Image (cartoon, rainbow, N blue to C red):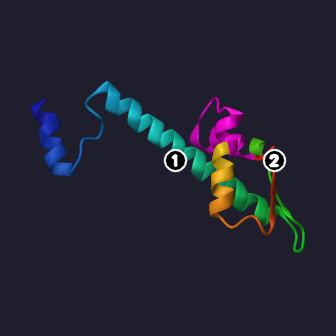
């Protein structure tokens, strides 16, 4: 316990949460952040794939694939991936040039 406290003082924070409740909260935060980042990456990849003048097509399956390949999530529910894609779609200014199946 003394080593953990010393590490917290030295590094500025503990590397792992000390309670199960905080550990679960940290995992949930990381999972949500990974989904949002996967949605951003899917939108960027779709924009790179689209030719000039064509609409950008971003699918929920793209977000799920990036979350599993890049972040190692073995199972991502479609509803959560769609919610992350909708959020990033609205925040990223995609209404002008993107098409998505997240609103179906």
SS class, disc 1 = helix
Work out whether residue 69 can be spotted. Answer: no
Q: Quadrant of residue 40?
A: bottom right
Looking at the image, which residue is at 79% across and 48% down?
A: 59
Task: Count residues near mark 1 (Cα–Cα under 10 Å), then give few for <14, some for 14-19, many for 20+.
Answer: few
In the displayed structure, does residue 34 sit left or right of residue 51? left
The residue under label 2 is: 101
Q: Residue furthest left?
A: 2
Give coordinates of residue 74: x percent, y percent. 63, 30
Looking at the image, which residue is at 88% across and 69% down?
A: 51
Stretch of the chain drawn in magenta: 62-82
Q: Quadrant of residue 23?
A: top left
Looking at the image, which residue is at 53% across and 43% down?
A: 32
Say which of 21 and 5 sits in front: 21
Is residue 40 covered in magenta?
no
**First in sequence: mark 2 or mark 1?**
1
Task: Count residues near mark 2 (Cα–Cα under 10 Å), then give few for <14, some for 14-19, many for 20+.
Answer: few
The residue under label 1 is: 33
Q: Which mark is residue 21?
A: none
Give coordinates of residue 54: x percent, y percent. 90, 68
In the displayed structure, does residue 90 sit left or right of residue 22? right
Work out whether residue 31 can be spotted. Answer: yes
Give coordinates of residue 1: x percent, y percent. 13, 29
81 lies above or below 54: above
Prevailing secondary structure class for the magenta stretch in the rendered image: helix
């Amino acid at each position: 316990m003394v080593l953990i406290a010393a590490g917290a003082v030295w590094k500025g924070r503990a590397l792992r949460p000390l309670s199960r409740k905080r550990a679960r909260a940290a995992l949930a935060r990381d999972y949500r952040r990974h989904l949002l980042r996967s949605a951003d990456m899917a939108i960027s990849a779709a924009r790179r794939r689209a030719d000039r003048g064509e609409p950008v097509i971003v699918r929920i399956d793209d977000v799920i694939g990036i979350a599993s390949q890049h972040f190692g999530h073995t199972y991502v529910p479609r509803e959560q991936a769609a919610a992350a894609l909708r959020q990033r779609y609205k925040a990223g200014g995609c209404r002008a040039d993107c098409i998505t199946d997240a609103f179906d």
